């Protein structure tokens, strides 16, 4: 497989002297895919040697964002991207369809729903969403600082 494919990270030259680690994967939009997203994320973050706090937070954030894409859209697949740059890890999940207005942070949660974005909000330094463009869905992203044995 070529660098930058769904299974091999690519070093991206963003500007002279700047590199980022990037990993992207796509999964069917089925509830079973959430565990697959956690497994793929865990394996990549282990390779990138992030500190334990960022590692565990990132896995939970991926789980919540992929779950939301599966449960709240009519997507057939979701795409997740991890990008490590300048001491930050950016997580982005793209779905194929969205409701107007995007995800909403719900301050009141019932027994089964409404906690996901509260967790994401509490665990990351920033998060948001935007249209993917051309009516192709929405991208929900989150960023968190990390410590790493190697710079990224």
Image: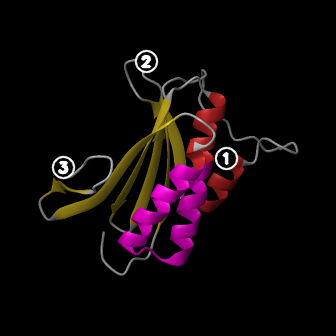
Q: Secondary structure beneath disc 3?
A: loop
Q: Which residues are magenta?
A: 35-63
Q: Residue at x 47, y 58 (%)?
A: 41
Q: Residue at x 53, y 42 (%)?
A: 128
Residue 21 placement (x, y as % from top left): 29, 60
Crowd around label 2: few <14 · some 14–19 · many ≥20 (10 Å): few
Query: Seen from this angle, which residue lies furthest left?
Result: 16
Q: Earlier in the sequence, mark 1 or mark 2?
A: 1
Decide whether residue 50 is among the magenta residues. yes
Q: Earlier in the sequence, mark 2 or mark 3?
A: 3
4 over 97 or under it: above or below = below
Residue 75 placement (x, y as % from top left): 53, 26
Distance between the alpha carbons at the discs numbered 1 and 3:
34 Å
The mark closer to the camera, 1 or 3, is 3
Q: Which residue is mark 1?
A: 117
56 over 107 or under it: above or below = below
Distance between the alpha carbons at the discs numbered 1 and 2:
23 Å
């Amino acid at each position: 497989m070529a660098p930058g494919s769904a299974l091999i990270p690519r070093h991206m030259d963003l500007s002279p002297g700047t590199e980022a680690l990037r990993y992207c994967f796509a999964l069917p939009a089925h509830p079973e895919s959430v565990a697959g997203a956690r497994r793929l994320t865990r394996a990549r973050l282990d390779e990138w040697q992030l500190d334990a706090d960022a590692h565990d937070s990132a896995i939970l954030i991926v789980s919540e964002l992929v779950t939301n894409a599966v449960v709240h859209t009519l997507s057939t697949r979701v795409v997740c991207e991890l990008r490590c740059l300048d001491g930050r890890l950016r997580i982005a999940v793209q779905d194929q369809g969205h409701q107007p207005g995007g995800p909403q942070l719900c301050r009141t949660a019932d027994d089964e729903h409404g906690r996901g974005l509260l967790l994401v909000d509490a665990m990351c330094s920033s998060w948001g969403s935007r249209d993917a463009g051309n009516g192709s869905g929405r991208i929900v992203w989150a960023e968190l600082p990390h410590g790493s044995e190697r710079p990224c």
